[in-house]
Image: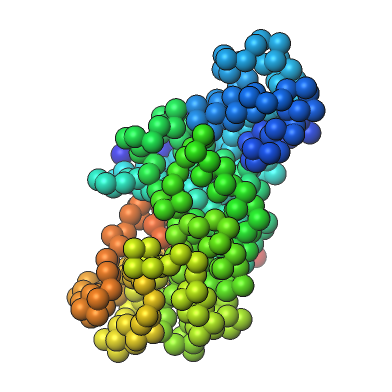
């Protein structure tokens, strides 16, 4: 199925707006404490945890190794929520994009990208974004709020629901990798991101290896070391320019944390080595950052950092101020970087027909509201 995709076939159980505690998003210790308040201690924490994150249960009735009175007690006191699917789209290349609605009516986007050797789930960490990177569609949407740990891990649960991935076996998975490259800057919501990732990493639940999780940052330097020390996940850095002058224009955050500070933090990132390299993302913008001189400067800039460089053809969106570099220019740029000893794959754009490609995510509800506002303004002007 391709083109504009299609509407969701069903809606998973929605989160309740009541004050009933949602077990999704609680740490194992928090879950144990809540169960202990009901007199349910010890091994029952592990049982409930496995139902939530290994088997993907959405009701307490499904927890058949718990006695019926215990299940009734749990149902009276707690809920197992899911984000609501507002829209599901499937690209011609198999990429899936879900527009997900939160309790307070906000909407975020989550994308699944299937490949022959892996399946990557791209999740969001904020509603909107505060960084206003000029080449990124999400950056044109103002930050509304941080996502909770429940909403972050909830994207993983929802994707597993839709892809039929329960129980969460470590064999023959469709979702093999998780990247925090969706809406928002993860390191500006570190506490909730960290809680969610600890749940995803837990060996008795979803059990995704930290080597298969990548957190992407635009360069929030003070948080990078803490992320590496506490979570140990792979790091990706949105670089996109080889001079402070240009990066200041493309990524305003660079004015606060310029290249020298950013690259020092990369060199000191815990665990980085030749077997575990930092990924530098570099979007290819025609006649902006794609010259031979830029390629050579990039090689010099990253010297001494175990690195992989992802060259990303710019993914256009309506009103974008840039154009994609030509294929010939991208190949020439990649040849220079590869010759210097850096793995430099050119990322094939995925899901462009459903606006799911890198840099294109922006809540569909916001686009619709903006379109309606423009249409209303036009109609009013015509009437006058």
Question: What residue is rendered at 33% in x and 54% in y?
Answer: 350
Location of residue 83 with respect to 233 vertically, above or below:
above
Res 361 seen here: no
Q: Position of residue 298 (x, y in %)?
A: 35, 82
In the figure, residue 154 lies in which quadrant? top right
Closer to the camera, 263 or 95?
Answer: 263
Residue at image position (58%, 71%) is 220
The quadrant in which the N terminus is found is top left
362 sits left or right of 94 in the view: right
The answer to whether residue 144 of the structure is visible from this angle is yes
Q: Is residue 138 above or below residue 39?
A: below
Residue at point 49% right, 38% down?
203
Q: Position of residue 82 (x, y in %)?
A: 59, 34
Residue 322: % across, % down: 40, 75
Quadrant for the C terminus, please: bottom right
Query: Residue drawn at (61%, 44%), measured in percent from left and top?
Result: 151
Q: How is the image coloured?
A: rainbow
Q: Is 241 left, or right, of 378 in this rendering?
A: left
Q: Say whether residue 86 is left or right of residue 324.
A: right
Question: Does 270 sit above or below residue 164?
Answer: below
């Amino acid at each position: 199925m391709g083109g504009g995709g299609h509407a969701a076939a069903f809606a998973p159980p929605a989160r309740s707006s009541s004050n009933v505690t949602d077990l999704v998003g609680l740490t194992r210790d928090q879950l144990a404490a809540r169960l202990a308040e009901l007199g349910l201690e010890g091994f029952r924490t592990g049982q409930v945890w496995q139902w939530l994150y290994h088997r993907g249960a959405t009701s307490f009735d499904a927890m058949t190794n718990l006695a019926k009175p215990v299940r009734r007690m749990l149902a009276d006191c707690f809920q197992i929520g899911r984000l609501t699917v507002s829209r599901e789209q499937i690209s011609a290349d198999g990429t899936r994009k879900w527009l997900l609605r939160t309790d307070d009516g906000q909407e975020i986007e989550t994308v699944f990208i299937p490949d022959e050797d892996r399946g990557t789930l791209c999740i969001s960490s904020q509603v909107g974004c505060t960084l206003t990177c000029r080449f990124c569609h999400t950056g044109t949407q103002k930050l509304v709020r941080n996502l909770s740990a429940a909403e972050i891990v909830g994207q993983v649960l929802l994707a597993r629901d839709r892809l039929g991935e329960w129980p969460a076996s470590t064999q023959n998975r469709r979702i093999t990798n998780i990247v925090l490259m969706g809406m928002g800057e993860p390191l500006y919501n570190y506490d909730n991101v960290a809680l969610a990732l600890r749940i995803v990493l837990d060996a008795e639940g979803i059990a995704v290896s930290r080597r298969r999780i990548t957190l992407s940052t635009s360069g929030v330097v003070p948080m990078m070391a803490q992320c590496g020390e506490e979570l140990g996940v792979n790091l990706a850095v949105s670089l996109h320019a080889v001079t402070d002058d240009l990066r200041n224009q493309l990524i305003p955050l660079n004015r606060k944390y310029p290249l020298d500070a950013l690259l020092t933090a990369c060199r000191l990132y815990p665990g980085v080595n030749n077997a575990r390299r930092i990924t530098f993302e570099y979007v290819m913008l025609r006649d902006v950052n794609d010259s031979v001189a830029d390629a050579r400067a990039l090689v010099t800039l990253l010297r001494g950092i175990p690195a992989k460089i992802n060259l990303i053809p710019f993914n256009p969106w309506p009103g974008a101020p840039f154009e994609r570099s030509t294929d010939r220019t991208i190949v020439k740029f990649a040849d220079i970087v590869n010759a210097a000893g850096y793995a430099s794959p050119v990322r094939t754009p995925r899901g462009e027909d459903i606006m799911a490609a890198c840099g294109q995510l922006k809540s569909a509800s916001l686009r619709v509201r903006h379109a309606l506002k423009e249409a209303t303004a036009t109609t009013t002007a015509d009437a006058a």
